[in-house]
Amino acid sequence: MSHKAVEIRNLSPSTYVLRLERNDFPFQPGQCVNLGIKGSGVNREYSTYSGMDDPYLEFLIKEVKGGTVSPALRKVEPGEEVELHGPYGSFVIQPEKINTASFVFIGTGTGIAPFHSFVRSYPDLDYQIIVGIRDATEQHDHQNYDSSRLTRCVSREKGNGFHGRVTDYLKQTEIALDKIYYLCGNQGMIHDAYDILRNAGVSGDQIFTEAFF
Ligand SMILES: Cc1cc2nc3c(=O)[nH]c(=O)nc-3n(C[C@H](O)[C@H](O)[C@H](O)COP(=O)(O)OP(=O)(O)OC[C@H]3O[C@@H](n4cnc5c(N)ncnc54)[C@H](O)[C@@H]3O)c2cc1C
């Protein structure tokens, strides 16, 4: 299957949003798809960034230096076809929990993508986001979240949130045992954050994870 590119929105030297035509493509917020240059035969997974009712599909993508797919997708022109397969994955919110549970979303870098889709799709969601970034250039679309629900953990500069990694933040904060936790981003963070939550007493069935790399 292929979808026409609508635009590339550059957010920083390393990160961009790829918008594709929706073509009635169905997905649940939090699921991912495989994207690639048409005919290349090489695809990578990307989480949906747009909301389930948006008339387009968006993906928040970090251009990995020396990578195959992420730099190539940044160069697609409007109107060019992008190969898309899916949707895949179970990093979703169970329908019965959407308006009854309280959520903590913990992500690093573009790992905030599925949370953007959750927040856009479910306007009444009771959530907190704890996002790990290196510096202010990585505040991707932070204006799209309720600022009282967003905690930035900034590892490489001071004065723009909590100074340190998300795991440092978790270690010094009170962990609520009645919330549902979603962890997304690099494996190291997910592994460490999972241990912190479990050691604090959060049950394993209240923790969902999605590792990007
Ligand atoms: C379920 C799932 C969902 C994903 N969703 C997203 C998403 O929404 N946005 C997104 O940007 N990426 C996402 N990824 C990562 C994406 O699939 C690719 O791995 C990434 O774009 C690199 O592909 P590439 O072909 O450019 O680099 P490759 O040629 O495959 O390899 C480059 C190297 O970069 C490493 N790498 C991969 N991602 C990163 C990263 N973010 N930062 C630093 N190093 C990295 C890889 O481990 C590899 O060693 C997701 C991965 C999975 C498994």
Image (cartoon, rainbow, N blue to C red):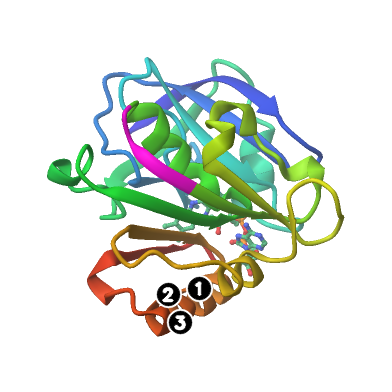
The reply, left or right, for residue 62 in relation to residue 180 is right
Q: Nearer the viewer, residue 134 or 10?
A: 134
The answer to whether the residues at label 2 and label 1 have Cβ atoms under 8 Å apart is: yes
Instruction: Indicate the quadrant where residue 16 lies.
Output: top right
State the quadrant of the C terminus: bottom right
Instruction: Indicate the quadrant where residue 143 lies.
Output: top right
Q: CA distance from mark 1 to mark 3?
A: 5 Å
Picture coordinates of residue 122 (x, y %)? Answer: 31, 30
Residue at 86 percent across and 54 percent down: it is: 158
Q: Residue furthest front?
A: 174
Q: Which residue is mark 1?
A: 193
The reply, left or right, for residue 66 in relation to residue 3 is right
Bin the neighbour count of mark 2 within 10 Å (Cα to Cα): few under 14, some 14-19, many 20 and up.
many
Residue 125 included in the magenta stretch of the image? yes
Residue 165 included in the magenta stretch of the image? no
The reply, left or right, for residue 189 in relation to residue 81 is right
Helix, strand or loop for disc 2: helix
Kind of residue at badge 3: Asp
The answer to whether the residues at label 2 and label 3 have Cβ atoms under 8 Å apart is: yes
Q: Which residue is mark 3?
A: 195
Kind of residue at badge 2: Leu
Q: Provide the residue span drawn in magenta.
A: 124-128
Picture coordinates of residue 78 (x, y %)? Answer: 59, 17
The answer to whether the residues at label 1 and label 3 have Cβ atoms under 8 Å apart is: yes
